[in-house]
Image (tube, helix red, strand yellow):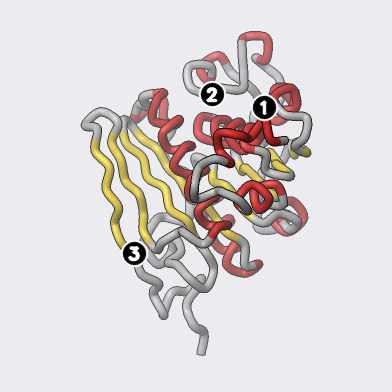
Amino acid sequence: MLDRYLTQISFPKLFPEGQRKIRSTSVAVVGVGGTGSHISELMVRMGFGKVKIVDHDTVELSNLNRQSLYDEEDIGRPKVYAAHEKLTKINREVEVIPVNLKVTEENADEILGDVNIIMDGTDSFGTRGVLNKFSIEKEKIFIFSAVEGSSGMAKAIIPGRTACLECIGYPTTGDSIPCSVNGLIPSVVEIAASISVTLAIKSILGYAEDEIIVFDSWDFSLEKIKTKKNPHCEVCGFKA
């Protein structure tokens, strides 16, 4: 293990117990498209104990410019099976579990009930709403991320400690506008994925703060905006 993870273990914030916590943490990446495929790859390379990849889509030609786990031979295949094939070749020490389903309120507990962290790789307001609510109810860390054009954002949602998506007014119903309409620079998904994985690590090590990270890769800007729990939030607020 030492050789594989030597450079990250040597990082002062991870030394000496950080890698053990990473190894003992199980995650679910919901959506393994642009952001989600990069998140999955980073988490497998870093040695998270279990990485469950959840998606119900198949690989299309238009995915290949930004979705790192797929190539032309994967076109038409379910994403989770193509991704599983690649990820197990990267690090066989990690248990990678493919789930070829869409997460809904009805099946969320069955799919996500056995993980510590839920990673957002979706492109749907409604699915994010399900993940946000489920993470609060089951007290699981939820790392939210979203991208559009040349910009993106990410936030660690820690039940009982930070604001959730409902608190900050982020839409939690309906479908978002496809990236084929609004456009998307492929490099944006890599930045969002890197920030998301860093937030996951900071969360399990106790460093995460109640803030949302907003960036623009075209303007080379990054801002941390403080957020605060809404005590009257319908999802995470105190109930009378």
Q: Is residue 5 above or below residue 82?
A: below
Query: How much space separates mark 1 and mark 2, taking CA atoms?
Result: 10 Å
Label 2 near label 1: C-beta < 8 Å?
A: yes
Q: Quadrant of residue 91?
A: top right
Q: Which amino acid lies under the numbered mark 2 shown in the image of this protein? A: Gln
Label 1 near label 3: C-beta < 8 Å?
A: no
Image quarter (top left, top right, bottom left or bottom right) of the N terminus: top right
Please name the residue that numbered disc 2 is placed on. Answer: 67
Along the line of sight, which residue is nearer the eye, 109 or 19?
Answer: 19
Q: Position of residue 117 (x, y in %)?
A: 62, 54
Q: Earlier in the sequence, mark 3 or mark 1?
A: 1
Query: Measuring 71% from the left and 42% from the top, which residue is drawn there?
Result: 52
Q: Is residue 1 above or below residue 199?
A: above
Please name the residue that numbered disc 1 is placed on. Answer: 79
Query: Measuring 29% from the left and 56% from the top, which residue is drawn there?
Result: 225
Q: Position of residue 109 (x, y in %)?
A: 73, 59
Q: Is residue 20 left or right of residue 122?
A: right
Q: Which amino acid lies under the numbered mark 1 shown in the image of this protein? A: Lys
Question: For numbered disc 2, what is the local secondary structure?
Answer: loop
Question: For numbered disc 3, what is the local secondary structure?
Answer: loop
Please name the residue that numbered disc 3 is placed on. Answer: 227
